[in-house]
Image (cartoon, coloured by chain):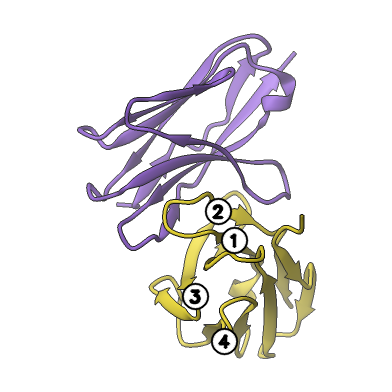
Chain colours: A purple, B yellow
Amino acid sequence: RKEVEQDPGPFNVPEGATVAFNCTYSNSASQSFFWYRQDCRKEPKLLMSVYSSGNEDGRFTAQLNRASQYISLLIRDSKLSDSATYLCVVRAAGNKLTFGGGTRVLVKP
Amino acid sequence: GAGVSQTPSNKVTEKGKYVELRCDPISGHTALYWYRQSLGQGPEFLIYFQGTGAADDSGLPNDRFFAVRPEGSVSTLKIQRTERGDSAVYLCASSEGAGAEAFFGQGTRLTVV
């Protein structure tokens, strides 16, 4: 089993709609969690950190469920510019950052 | 300010040759990571430095791969006897320390022919 798993998608989303997807992790001792965004042939960039209480940044909401070992990302009012690959990242106790395989989102007019 | 810089941006080499990939982290960042990313995959962890020492090198695929960071700043990833399967984008990231956001360079696209 991979340490961090994501549905590769693609999630085809009509512009203005809401899309949500999860990421599961296997190491129960994982300490911190992030969502990164990666555009085609570009480097990953931090979208948001994920806090235990859940957090929101504009149209983006991230949740953490430690009991079931998953994190989620929800995008409201999707824009064409939200089309990208979303990478789930988990930091273990030794500070190693492990990436999931990414979830591809395509927002269409 | 300057971000993470990786050189070269592209490298084409012949099978069996030796290559060095360089990473200049953001000034003052103590943590430095190397990843490898193949098309359609997420970044695969290779090695993590805290200062000058390799804190975790569990991702290096075999002994052809080696990385150094002698002064706790610039890092070099070295690949000996390259194979076609080594072709990928090699990404470097740095962060201020444990728990901080990691910033990525634009990567080095390595092609082994």
Residue type (three-letter) at the residue carrying disc 4: Pro
Same subunit: marks 2 and 4? yes
The residues bearing labels 4 and 1 have C-alpha atoms spaced at a distance of: 17 Å
Look at the numbered disc 1 and give the secondary structure of its residue.
strand
Disc 4 and disc 1 on one polypeptide chain: yes
The residue pinned by badge 1 equals B93
Q: Are marks 2 and 3 in contact (CB under 8 Å)?
A: no
In the displayed structure, B77 sits above or below A25; it is below
- Label 2 to label 3: alpha-carbon separation: 15 Å
Give the mark nearest the N terminus, 2 or 1: 1
In this rendering, is residue B54 above or below A42?
Answer: below
Amino acid type of disc 3?
Gly
In this rendering, the label closer to the viewer, 1 or 3:
3
Q: Which residue is mark 2?
A: B102
- Precedes in sequence: disc 2 or disc 4: 4
Q: Nearer the viewer, residue A106 or B53?
A: B53
Q: How busy is the neighbourhood of tag 1: few (under 14 within 10 Å), some, or many (20 plus)?
A: many
User: In the image, residue A32 lies at what x, y percent?
Assistant: 37, 45
| Distance CA(mark 4)–CA(mark 3) | 9 Å
Q: Are marks 2 and 1 on the same chain?
A: yes
**Local crowd size for mark 4, using a 10 Å CA cut-off: few (<14), some (14–19), many (≥20):** few
Name the disc covering residue B70, or none. Answer: 4
Task: Tell me whether the residue at label 2 lies in contact with that at label 4, contact meaning CB atoms closer than 8 angstroms.
Answer: no
Is residue B80 rendered to the left or right of residue B99? right
Please report, as a chain letter, where disc 1 is located. Answer: B
- Circle 3 sits on which residue? B51
Q: Secondary structure at mark 3?
A: loop
Q: Chain of mark 3?
A: B
